[in-house]
Image (spheres, helix red, strand yellow):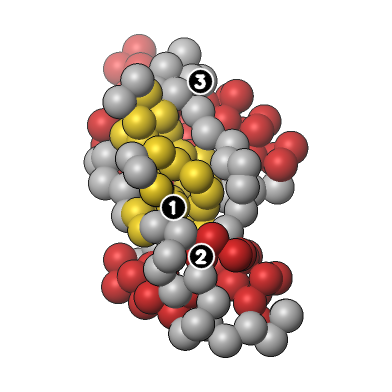
Amino acid sequence: MTTVSDILSRKGREVVSTNTEDSVLSAARSMNEHGIGGVVVIDEGKMVGIFTERDILQRVVAEQRDPATTRLGEVMTTPVASCRPETGIDECVRVMTGKRIRHLPVVDSDGVCGIVTSGDILAFQVREQEDTIQYLNSYIFDLR
């Protein structure tokens, strides 16, 4: 069974985080700088929310809030769906589809230890399928 740990071992465990007092503008700049679609919001060492591109559209732009003065604590998504490193990829897909989310923080006994996105899962599955196809092709052609 493929797990979240398998994805994290390929993509890395870097998590970009911020806190509830940071502004939306600061978070958006950080997301742009890192080329990501969301940041984990951590206060006092604990994950308290997540802030994504969807939050910017729905809770900032659509409500005509000023991103420079709006604090993440006002517009972040909470509670946060998360998974563990040993969670299977199929379970992650079910959670993401059911909750209509694209970012899933990974939590272990020490706290947030990574994040997987729907894009990460898709890329991993495509790579596994390509490896399988290559293996089957070599197997078939070796039989000849």
Q: Amino acid at mark 1?
A: Val
Instruction: Give the x, y percent position of residue 51.
Output: 52, 59
Element marked by disc 3: loop
Q: Would residue 4 appear left or right of 55 to someone viewing this image?
A: left
- Asked if residue 144 can be seen in this view, the reply is no
Identify which residue, 4 or 82, lies in the foreground.
Answer: 82
Q: How many marks?
A: 3
Disc 3 marks a residue whose amino acid type is Gly
Q: Is residue 90 above or below residue 144?
A: below
Contact (Cβ within 8 Å) of mark 3 with mark 2:
no
The image position of residue 13, as x and y in percent, is 27, 40
Give the mark nearest the N terminus, 1 or 3.
1
* Residues packed near mark 1 inside 10 Å, few (<14), some (14 to 19) or many (20 plus): many
Q: Residues within 10 Å of mark 2 (few under 14, many from 20)?
A: many
Which amino acid type is marked by label 2? Leu
The spot of residue 1 in percent (x, y) is 46, 13
The span from disc 1 to disc 2 (Cα, nearest Å) is 8 Å
Q: Nearer the viewer, residue 80 or 13?
A: 80
Q: CA distance from mark 1 to mark 3?
A: 24 Å
Q: Which mark is residue 41?
A: 1
Q: Tag 2, which secondary structure?
A: helix
The answer to the question of whether label 1 and label 2 lie on touching residues, with beta carbons closer than 8 A, is yes
Which residue is identified by label 3? 88
Q: Secondary structure at mark 1?
A: strand
**Residue in the foreground of this view, choosing between 129 and 65:** 65
Q: Is residue 66 above or below residue 112?
A: below
Residue 140, image quadrant:
top left
Res. 113 image quadrant? top left
Per the model, the C-alpha gap separating discs 3 and 2 is: 31 Å
Say which label, 3 or 2, has the lower sequence index: 2
Q: Nearer the viewer, residue 122 or 51?
A: 51
| Numbered disc in front, either 3 or 2 | 2
